[in-house]
Every structure is written in C-alpha cells, then in structure tokens.
C-alpha cells in the first residue's frame, strides 16, 4: 500500500529527518544515506529529497522534523499527534522498520510523521548500514512492506539485503551486488505519484 503525505508537506517535495539522541553515532551514516537517496531522486525524478533537521518531531502537532531516525534495542516507542505507538525490533536484526502516523479521515488518511528504527547493535559494515537506512527512507516516502521490490528484480528496496564482502547483495536469488546503490524503475514508479 502507498499513502501520500499531508498536502502541505508533499508540496515542499522535501522530507526533513532528525536523528534521535540514541542515534548520534549514526549521523555520518545518515548523512551519506541522504546524499545517496537524493542522487537517486535526481536521476529517477522521484520528486522528493531529504534534508537533516535539528528539531525532533513534536509529539502533539505537525511541528519539528517530518521523519525521525532512532535505534531500537528490542522494544521501541514513538508518539505523533498525541497517539502512542510501539513495536519490537531485535538489536541485532539485519533490517529496520518504519512506522507512520496519519491524520485525516480513514477514507482520506495522509501521513504526518514517520519514525524509522534501525537495530542498535547490528554488526555489519558501514555500507550495509547505509543501504538499510536508504531502504527505510524509501519506506518513509509513503510505501509499506507490500510494495517491496521482488527477488526477481531486486534493488535497495527489496526485503532481503545481505552483506557480501564489502558490498550488499540485493534479493535472495539474483546475483546483484551494490555498490552503487540502485533503484529499479518499478520502485521509482511507486514513489513518483506520491510526490507529483
């Protein structure tokens, strides 16, 4: 499923992202991930870019960053528009999770905040961390797990990213190794209309 962001956010063609206090050591990874995502956006006309924010998302209104990146050490919590959310991500998982806060009616729900959680104690090389972060940034544009790229035609948005030497293998079956980080036209086509 794809869900658009609130019109006032979507019209900026930009998402701001804040690194939570527990993700301070992840800031260099996030910076590189933003650069890589924005390069993909430019080359594939995704119509949305990211920039860092020094202001955390306000838990009660639309102020602050649109997206927050935090590390999870098992159970995690988030709050947006006064609503609480929670979940679980193992500290050594090889994947992240993105959770959304929506506003509006059930028939016309729009995204107002996104919360990215990455595993706090994952033992992989930095390029894998960058790929995981870009993957979750793709989710934060408004795309849920049902829209992952297939193992037959994998990219940074496939459900299986695996370290392979100093690179990352995309998918379970295809022999596609990044770098560079790439995105298929199928994934791009999911993002483009959300931000046009």
Image (tube, grey):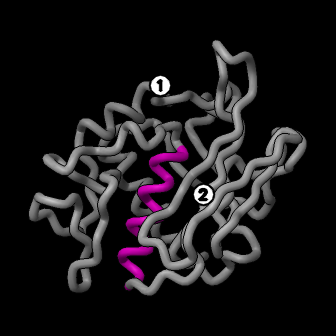
Q: What number is the disc on residue 116?
A: 2
Residue 37 lies, with reference to residue 184, above or below; the image says below
Question: Quick check: is 139 in the magenta stretch?
Answer: yes
Whether tag 1 and tag 2 are in contact, CB under 8 A, the answer is: no
Judged left or right of residue 15, residue 57 is right
Q: Position of residue 78 (x, y in %)?
A: 76, 54
Disc 1 residue crowd, few under 14, some 14–19, many 20+, Cα 10 Å: few
- Residue at 47 percent of width and 25 percent of height: 196
Q: Earlier in the sequence, mark 1 or mark 2?
A: 2
Question: Quick check: is 134 in the magenta stretch?
Answer: yes
- Residue at 33 percent of width and 54 percent of height: 159
Q: CA distance from mark 1 to mark 2?
A: 23 Å
Quadrant the N terminus occupies? top left
The magenta stretch is: 125-140
Query: Mark 1 or mark 2: which is in front?
Result: 2
Q: Position of residue 129 (x, y in %)?
A: 44, 74
Residue 91 lies, with reference to residue 193, above or below; the image says below
Q: What residue does disc 1 label?
A: 196
């Amino acid at each position: 499923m794809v869900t658009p962001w609130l019109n006032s956010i979507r019209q900026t063609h930009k998402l701001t992202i804040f690194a939570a206090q527990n993700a301070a050591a992840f800031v260099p990874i996030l910076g590189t991930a933003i650069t890589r995502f924005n390069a993909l956006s430019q080359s594939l006309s995704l119509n949305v870019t990211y920039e860092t924010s020094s202001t955390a998302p306000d838990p009660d209104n639309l102020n602050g960053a649109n997206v927050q990146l935090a590390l999870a050490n098992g159970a995690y919590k988030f709050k947006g528009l006064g609503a609480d959310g929670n979940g679980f991500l193992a500290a050594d998982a090889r994947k992240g999770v993105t959770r959304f806060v929506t506003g509006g009616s059930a028939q016309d729900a729009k995204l107002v905040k996104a919360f990215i959680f990455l595993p706090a104690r994952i033992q992989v090389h930095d390029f894998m961390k960058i790929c995981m972060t870009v993957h979750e940034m793709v989710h934060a544009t408004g795309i849920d797990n049902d829209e992952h790229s297939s193992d037959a035609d994998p990219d940074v948005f496939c459900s299986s990213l695996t370290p392979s030497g100093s690179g990352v293998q995309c998918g379970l079956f295809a022999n596609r190794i990044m770098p560079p980080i790439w995105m298929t036209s199928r994934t791009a086509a999911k993002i483009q209309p959300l931000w046009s």
